[in-house]
Image: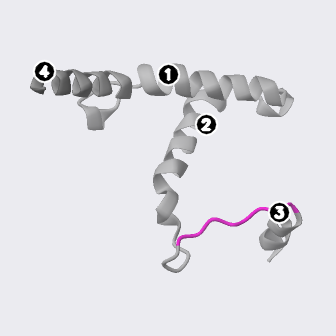
Amino acid sequence: ELYRKAINRYGIVQSMNSAGGRCHDNARCESMWARFKEELLYGRYDPTSMTVEQLKTLIWRYFISYWNNRRICSANGGLPPMVKRQQYYASQQEAA
């Protein structure tokens, strides 16, 4: 009840799926943010002492530079997402 009152006070709409309030509808997004916090924030930075602009820059650099271009992804055969995407588009060009 305390949580619901707090989100209502700030005008936040609670995210729930249409099938009865299960949290699994955004599990991938939650996993991404958990990984981001574990790999980048915890033990490396103190977000409470950073400005909003510093945090925005840190988040932008992490996702644009690391997450897309250098992060090893086991679902992609050990390749970063951008490399896998480039391989896909190259294969489409060859097929055309």
Q: Residue at x 56, y 75 (%)?
A: 21
Ranked by sequence position, the earlier of labels 1 and 3 is 3
How many residues crowd mark 3 within 10 Å: few (<14), some (14–19), many (20+)?
Answer: few
Q: Is residue 11 magenta?
A: yes
Residue type at numbered disc 4: Glu
Q: Residue at x 52, y 80 (%)?
A: 20
Secondary structure beneath label 4? helix
Q: Which residue is mark 3?
A: 11
Ranked by sequence position, the earlier of labels 4 and 2 is 2
Q: Which residue is mark 2?
A: 37
Secondary structure beneath label 3? loop
Residue type at numbered disc 2: Lys
- Give the magenta range: 10-17
How many residues crowd mark 4 within 10 Å: few (<14), some (14–19), many (20+)?
Answer: few
Q: Which residue is mark 4?
A: 94
Left or right: 43 in relation to 52: left
Residue type at numbered disc 3: Gly
How many residues crowd mark 1 within 10 Å: few (<14), some (14–19), many (20+)?
Answer: few
Q: Which residue is mark 1?
A: 66
Secondary structure beneath label 1? helix
Ranked by sequence position, the earlier of labels 1 and 4 is 1
Left or right: 42 in relation to 66: right
Residue lying farthest to the bottom in this orientation: 20
Query: Residue 90 appears at what percent x and percent y?
Result: 21, 20
